[in-house]
Amino acid sequence: MSGALIRASDLSVRHAGADQPVLSHIDLRIDPAEIVTVVGPNGSGKSTLVRALLGQVKLASGRVERLAGLRIGYVPQRVHIERAMPMTVRRFLSLPLRVSDAQAAAVLERTGVPGLEGRQIAALSGGQFQRVLLARALLNHPQLLVLDEPTQGLDQPGIIAFYKLIEEVRAETGAAVLMVSHDLLVVMRASDRVICLNGHICCEGTPQVVSAAPAYRALFGAESQGTLALYRHHHDHDHDHVADHVHGPDCAHHHHA
Amino acid sequence: MLDDFMTRALLAGLGLVLATGPLGSFVVWRRMAYFGDSTSHAAILGVALSFAFAMPFYLGTGLVAVAMALAVAWLTGRGQGMDTVLGVIAHSALAVGLLAASFIPALRVNLDAFLFGDILAVSKGDLGWIWGGAVVVLGVLIWRWQRLVTASVNEELALASGIDPGVERLILSLTVAITVAIAIRIVGALLISAMLIVPAAAARAIAKTPEQMAGSATLIGALSVMGGLWASLRLDTPAGPSIVAISAVFYVVFLTLYRK
């Protein structure tokens, strides 16, 4: 493993009844304290990849090795809490393991929402709720934080603030972060490494490298121009070329019906 | 003391709400209302089978309810829609149960008691079954409380904490099945799910945590039992429906007073 927290080799996942695998032949590793972001269109298998790395789905091939005793803090996609269930923030932090008031206060403080203990989860704003979910994920002092679309439903300032928080948490705790995201522009700035996924890994590397990669531009089209502009000074390229770029056939959008 | 029919009725009702308060909260949180309803309708088949094979009807209804819970879990696990599976199994079981009942003279006379309950006719033997079942249900819920609540909050979060949401779901289905078996004598097959849902729904308005809701639901259930029995004694109303009607009053009052 040579220090990697998680390492996947030749990982493939197939959903029951589907003719095409959701993920095929993925190789990837996550090292301590790095922020890795997975981007990709809808249906590209981002969430499946996360769940495969966490060991929640059956693999069709390949293997996932996790560091022995790896502590993971996980924030799943679109957590919805039934309004029928009364739930204070304090009580929520004690699920499933009970934590002390001091621990609860500390993680809420850390994620920028101190003093929310007595509030009902259902009464929180989207941004507050995401921070509470992050606080809960920090309770077991994770070596790896896994965040699946953590900024869904947040406005632009909210998104930027949330990624800033993630960087702070990483700097403070040394936890590695694996994120799945749609917010190309912002997320690229906050990442050490970006993995561009569409059933397989189309391209990966530093944000600069990925944003200039033909496969990435083919996958995200116009939206990629924004991230490209961010890094323009690193590259000497021609915009008119984007449409003509030759790339692997399976890097184009293919939607799972 | 147990020789007084009113004391026995009261003890039976209080035993039942020990199980229905916390369990009903899960039924509300997880939208299992239709499951509760279906299981209690299917229990009529259990009543008929118990008469046919001369076994204690708690055993017969319990077995049928548990079999139904397992069948539903198995079929939904194979991709069938929950609503459809419940509708097919529960109503088929009810229909077959009513058919069977028509061939059993003793049951034909008594069928009303099982559809609408007969808490005032509870015997000492019934009390044993009811309290035994309620203590088992409550014990299981307390034992697995943190896991059950986590799985009810969010299955993905539960999974990431090493909890198998499927196991917790099955446990709740089985405890509902046991509760149906012990409740049928008290409020009848038609009103069992009301005992699960109405007190818990009323408690929702005043509770801030899952534990407060489970506790308040139990208390509201207990007050409803006492009120219903009092009404039955004083006003000569049928006991089962009176209990449920009083819980409904709690629901309306709390919803009005504590509307957020």
Image: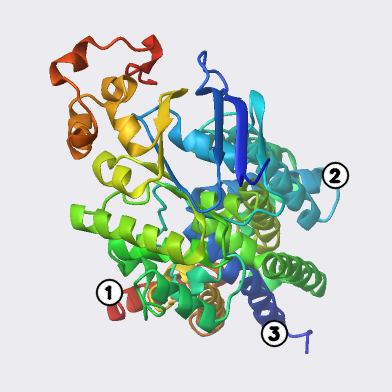
User: Do residues under tags 3 and 2 come within 8 Å of each other at their CB atoms?
Assistant: no
* Residue under the image location 28 percent in, 27 percent down: A212
Rendered position, B233 above or below B23: below
Identify the chain of the residue marked 3, using the numbered disc in the image: B
Q: Which mark is residue B10?
A: none
Q: CA distance from mark 2 to mark 1?
A: 53 Å
Residue A254 appears left or right of A217: right
**Amino acid marked by disc 1:** Lys
Identify the chain of the residue marked 2, using the numbered disc in the image: B
**Amino acid marked by disc 3:** Thr
**Amino acid marked by disc 2:** Phe
Rendered position, A99 above or below A219: below
- Give the residue number, with chain letter if any, for mark 2: B53
> Element type at marker 1?
loop
Pick the quarter of the image with the N terminus of chain B.
bottom right
- Give the residue number, with chain letter if any, for mark 3: B7
Question: In x, y percent, where is residue A224?
Answer: 23, 30
Assess disc 3: are there few (<14), some (14-19) or many (≥20) residues with their C-alpha within 10 Å of its C-alpha.
some
User: Do residues under tags 2 and 1 come within 8 Å of each other at their CB atoms?
Assistant: no
Assess disc 1: are there few (<14), some (14-19) or many (≥20) residues with their C-alpha within 10 Å of its C-alpha.
few
> Element type at marker 3?
helix
Q: Are marks 3 and 2 on the same chain?
A: yes
The answer to whether residue B223 of the structure is visible from this angle is: no
* Mark with earlier residue (1, 3): 3
Q: CA distance from mark 1 to mark 3?
A: 39 Å
Residue A157 appears left or right of B5: left
Question: In x, y percent, where is residue A136?
Answer: 49, 65
Q: Nearer the viewer, residue B192 or A99?
A: A99
